[in-house]
Amino acid sequence: MINRIEVVKKYLDKEYFSGRIYEKQDFFRFQLAKIFLSRISIADEYVETIKRLSEEGLVVYALRQKSKLNSLILYELAGRKGLPQPLYCHGMNMSFWHPICRMIKLLWSSFLRLFSGEKKAWKKKLSYLERIIRRKNSVIIHLGQSEFINSRTAETGISSLINAQKSVDFPIFIVPILVSYGRRREKEDESLINILFGQTEHTGAIRRLITFMRYASKAFVITSESINLLNYLNVCSDNTPKKTIVRDLRAELIERIEKEKTAVVGPVLKSREAFIGMVLSDKNMQQFIADYTLKEKKEIAAVEKEAKKYLYEITADYSETMIQIWLKLLRWLWMNIFDGLVVDQEGLAKLRNISKKMPFIVIPCHRSHIDYLIFSYVLYVNNIQLTFIAAGNNLSFFPMGYIFRKSGAFFMRRSFRGNELYSEVFAKYMAILLKEGYAIEFFIEGGRSRSGKMVMPKYGLLSMVIQALQDKYCDNFAAIPVYLGYDRVIEERSYLKEISGEPKTPENTAEIIKTGSILRKRYGRVYLNIGEPIIMKDYLAAQEKHIEQMTLDERQGLYRKIGYEIVLEINKVSLVTPFSLVAAVILSHDRRGISHDDLSDVFNEFYEYLVMRKVKLAATFAQKDKAIIDAVNVFIQDGIISKVETEEDQLEDMLDVVYSLADENRLYLEYYKNNVLHFFVALSFVATSMMKSNEDIMSLGKIMADYKFLKKLLWNEFIFDEKTDDVDEVNNVLEYLFQRKMIKAEEREDGAWIEIKGRGRMKLKFFAGLIHNYLESYWIVIRSCYYLKKSIIEEKEWHKKIRSLGNRLYRKGEVLRMESLSHVNYINAIRFLEDAEIISAIVKEEKAQKREVLYSLTGNRAEMEVLRRRIFKLL
């Protein structure tokens, strides 16, 4: 039995039209073209969408440009990917690809139609188009450049679709298609070749062919959101003229393609000089300069000259050529030092949809200098517009400063303090970027995290972009929290030195040359997850008080709140790797080694807790035992831990493999432990309270008191969810411990009491051990406050004394863990003591953006002693 499709094709093949595409093309011409056509790519998500639509109705492809090449690309791609292949291209002459015999018949048919007149011949084409559609065969229509420019091909094609839809019982899905020959941004000032051969969007046939042949391997197809024609017509009023429906539908399809194009390459690219001119001529900037000159009693020309100098220091100088160089370099990098890049595709799809509607600001965590490159690479290969990246001016040294600037980086000083003009110029540059629709990227933590944890957010740049929204530079923008994580970071050795108190080595060319040794190692996988976007206009509208009615303190409180929610979201979407979990297990006690069986037991206990919390886990956890061994072997190969094998004459109960860890290597693992520590904080607080109880049974009130004390003490160390009540957090932990049969609860007249079982005490000590080093660090700093009893001490001198005391206490055995001797922990402990008003910081002087700080004790010395004793009880 001949199937329906073959019958349709046989019937249609009796008529010959130039727009017809036959299943069997001319062999030699089409095979030659396929050499290039086969390089065109399309994302799997688009393929699946079209397949789903074809099951529900008929797919009609809508191209903006009237292009034979693009039509042929679409036909070949559909066949290669198993999509509905178009049988007809309305308004196009595809006869060059017809077999010779059909080409001759077409010429004869065309000759005969000439005698019937042009109008009649055109009507036959439209009738043929409608018959194909009614028989549920896909076609291609072309929309033209604008709905305001008349196009008989575009208008009659859409009109025929409407006619056909009214006569069939299945929906017609019009799928807007963007065919792009690479990622090149359009420039405001185009080159001579573009002027001669046509612009990127409105290319002539010759340049389109040359461009395609040159960039075929970079070309791709993107589909926009389809229009269900049946539903579209049902919504239209019966009184709406058909001409209006055709025009509006055409406009909507063109707009969807244009949004896809903007999402891929971004707005038209302006030169660096154009950006500088836009900032200086901005009316708000002009007003600021006028007010600033009066206040500082300077000439306007001198202030504008200074502002222009700052802009040359700040602004990016984007170059497509540099992006292409980076792309090749990064592909080589992933292959040679990393084992792969694991990307949150669902999150990227959300980001792509947002990019069609508004500017977006990417706000990642900051773990490594590689961060600057990774997200741009991911955006590029996933056809999303690249961001302009805020970078510290420590990276502006030659030649990297030139390279980064050409790659879309704009530079900022570490501090804006005391320079109003610089601050305003920088803020207005970011505002202009948003106004023009460009995407921005900045790191809310400021610098890279040396500890492996999220650093408390800095809200300076965040306040600038929110102010730009308030000043109507843009209608809206989306803040996108992004997690970037590594199995291993390439800077781990330099971080170790900084944590130990050594000053940071400034970035320079010599340091870049030294990184050659990095290229001889492998650092595992890189992970990228995207959090829930904050649509800023909606977020601000949901506040109890309008931002314009807020006082300065209230605004700063709002900025802090938004910043805190962003870093909290980054923590939520962060991912646990076997490397970080093995590091946490090894550091969960203060012994010099751990047996393989014990390591596996604790690993599994930690794993079960993460599963209960529904934490994102690396795919390698699917084979847990292998994941443990692989992680351990990497640490062994790098000399961080050593494997102690058993000897033949040892007793059977001593045949377990032991992993030994030298004290000086504990800080290496501390970084990776901290990557996942935030998931365990609540349980670690409760476990610490229970482990330091002298009895096997303790009141819930005591646990709650200890929990609140630890939360207050370590507020600067971890990101706490303020929306979750402390009581709920503790109850969730207790419920888990009860399910794991570690505790038993009972009600008494004076409240709830918790009994800690023997098995539970053995397991809880590992959870408590995860934060033990923080308590030791804070205890060291509290002890060092006695230096302040004698006299006021300068900041650097006090830091030196703290490190010296910590080392002495460690050698005496009063501090058990080497990772407690962390300069980062000391700084956070000092900040806590300042907030608690136990010590005070006095700024002696401020010159060249540098502060000299002196520390002294306040009158709350009794409170300091109470704090010291309470921490000591938890050690």
Image: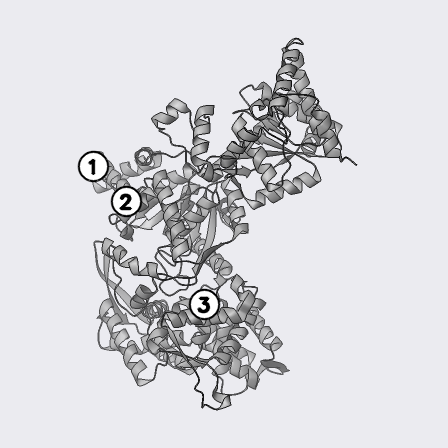
Task: Give neighbour class at mark 3: few <14, some 14-19, many 20+ (Cα, 10 Å).
Answer: many
Q: Position of residue 858 (x, y in %)?
A: 30, 72
- The nearer-to-camera label among 2 and 1 is 2
Q: Residue 536 location in percent, x, y? A: 48, 46
Q: Foreground residue, 556 or 84?
A: 84
Q: Could you tell me if residue 768 is visible in this image? A: yes
For disc 3, the marked residue is: 579
The residues bearing labels 3 and 1 have C-alpha atoms spaced at a distance of 56 Å
Residue 204 appears in the picture as rendered = no
Label total for image: 3
Residue at 37% across, 74% down: 666
Name the N-terminal-most of marks 3 and 1.
1
Query: Does the CB distance between marks 2 and 1 fall below 8 Å?
Result: no
Query: In terms of image quadrants, where is residue 868?
Result: bottom left
Residue named by callout 2? 402
Q: Nearer the viewer, mark 3 or mark 1?
A: 3
- Helix, strand, or loop for circle 3? helix
Q: Is tag 3's residue or tag 2's residue first in the polypeptide sequence?
A: 2
Among the two numbered marks 2 and 1 on one chain, the one whose residue lies closer to the N terminus:
1
